[in-house]
Amino acid sequence: MRQSETPRWVKAYYKRAHWFKGVERVLEAMYQAREGGVVAKSLAALTTFSAAMESLYPGENAWELLARQDYQESDYSLGGFFCNLLMRSNLPRTTRMAGLTSQMILWESAGGGIAAIYQGAVYQDGPFLQHGDRDHFERVLQEVVWGTGHDLMLSARPENPGNYRGSNKFRFSPMPPPGFYVGKNRPEDLAAWLGRFGRVPRTMLLRGPTGVGKSVLARHIAQQAKGTARTLKIADSMLKNCIFDEVDGLIEVLQPSVLLLDDVTFNEEADTERFLTMLEALRSPDCLVIATMMANTGGEQDKKPEQGGWYFPGMRPGRIDKILTLYLHDAEERNSILQSYYLEFGGMEDYPLWSRIVDATEGLSGAYLMEIARRLAVFGFDDWRDTVDELRRSAPPPGEGESRVLLPGASNVPVPR
């Protein structure tokens, strides 16, 4: 039994607790009046009658309210997580006792009602939906979640005191703006390409080395393709902690317009097949799926691959429809990135030798170029060579960033990840 789950017999007791309290009052009155006179026995009789009436016809409790107003218990696999999102929101609510130590939280609006049972701050049961209206519940939840921002990231909660129905398993946090993107792949062109398919579901994979802007490009594609997109980002580490029903439930209820799966890995054949099967099941014309994957893309073999060069087990259209590979920036791109970030960070000096810095940063990705530009804006250009050398030492060596994937007919073939 889960730690926070209330057994059925306890729920049954809560619903009928007034009976037991009534019996207790009757026995107490009879005991106190057993040796009394007529007056004492008459008062005991009145107390007994009052206790019996209260037991047979009590004031309405939480469970009776749920039954009378046709609240039906839902079967959401993440019902606890959803209820906790409502608890942390600013939605108006009322509280009723639901047992000796539990209370019912009730969110009512013109469109319907939602209820949940809590013991203190710990989720126990729910949501209960008036008339079983899932559409109303999902609309309310979407307003709560997306009201905090249109770019959200799902992460694991560091403290997990209880996880019944996902109650304390996850949390949402807003993502900062993506910043600008510099590269040969124009987000508007890719969004237009996707738009040519109409409402046919599409899944895109962006692969490349660390720091080349895969996630930034993905978010710009999302904005171009979907306008004011509801983007939900889930890292690969989170996917490994979710069962499929939980991911599917999140997408079904929250209805993001873009699902961004960040830094997916294909290290084991079974995990790869599971992930690709999930991609296939999540396909929807209303949700664009973009995954990013770390890969070493420095060699000519990757730029001009033969058949199977980018393949991994289980891959096919219908699971991943388009693969876009990002490479380390050329001189023109590095120049644009360095100068753009230099100005964004408040740099004012017009340095005549940018070309030397551009040449010295060959092989560095955008994340490192951004940090170089930041330091140039803060400290100036006197020690720019030391700055570049320092960051070079902390950058991945050429050829790094491979993972191993089990391919058909080969047990240990290194494949870009």
Image (tube, rainbow, N blue to C red):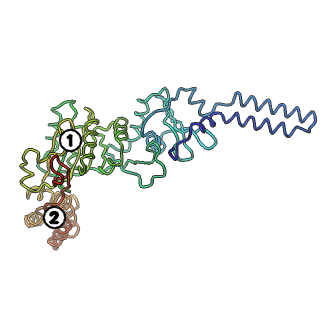
For the point 10% across and 64% down, the residue is 354
Residue position for label 1? 314
For the point 19% across and 67% down, the residue is 391
Q: Amino acid at mark 2?
A: Pro
- Give left or right: position of 229 versus 128: left
Q: Residues within 10 Å of mark 1 (few under 14, many from 20)?
A: some
Q: Position of residue 142 (x, y in %)?
A: 38, 37
Q: Position of residue 320 (x, y in %)?
A: 19, 40
Q: Is residue 194 visible?
A: yes
Q: Is residue 178 visible?
A: no
Q: Position of residue 181 (x, y in %)?
A: 18, 51
Residue 388 position (above or below residue 180): below
Residue 211 position (above or below residue 282): below
Q: Amino acid at mark 1?
A: Gly
- Give left or right: position of 291 versus 39: left
- Give left or right: position of 273 versus 300: right
Count of all numbered marks drawn on residues in the image = 2
Q: As rendered, which of 12 and 145 lies closer to the eye?
A: 12
* Helix, strand or loop at mark 1: loop
For the point 45% across and 39% down, the residue is 79
Q: Measure the C-alpha gap from mark 2 to mark 1.
A: 30 Å
Please identify, in this view, whether the residue under mark 2 or under mark 1 is nearer the observer: 1
Would you identify the image quadrant in which residue 252 lies? top left
Mark 2 vs 1, N-terminal side: 1
Residue 191 position (above or below residue 347): above
Q: Position of residue 188 (x, y in %)?
A: 16, 41
* Helix, strand or loop at mark 2: loop
Q: Residues within 10 Å of mark 2 (few under 14, many from 20)?
A: few
Name the mark on residue 397: 2
Q: Are marks 2 and 1 in contact (CB under 8 Å)?
A: no
Q: As rendered, which of 387 and 118 lies closer to the eye?
A: 118
Name the mark on residue 408: none
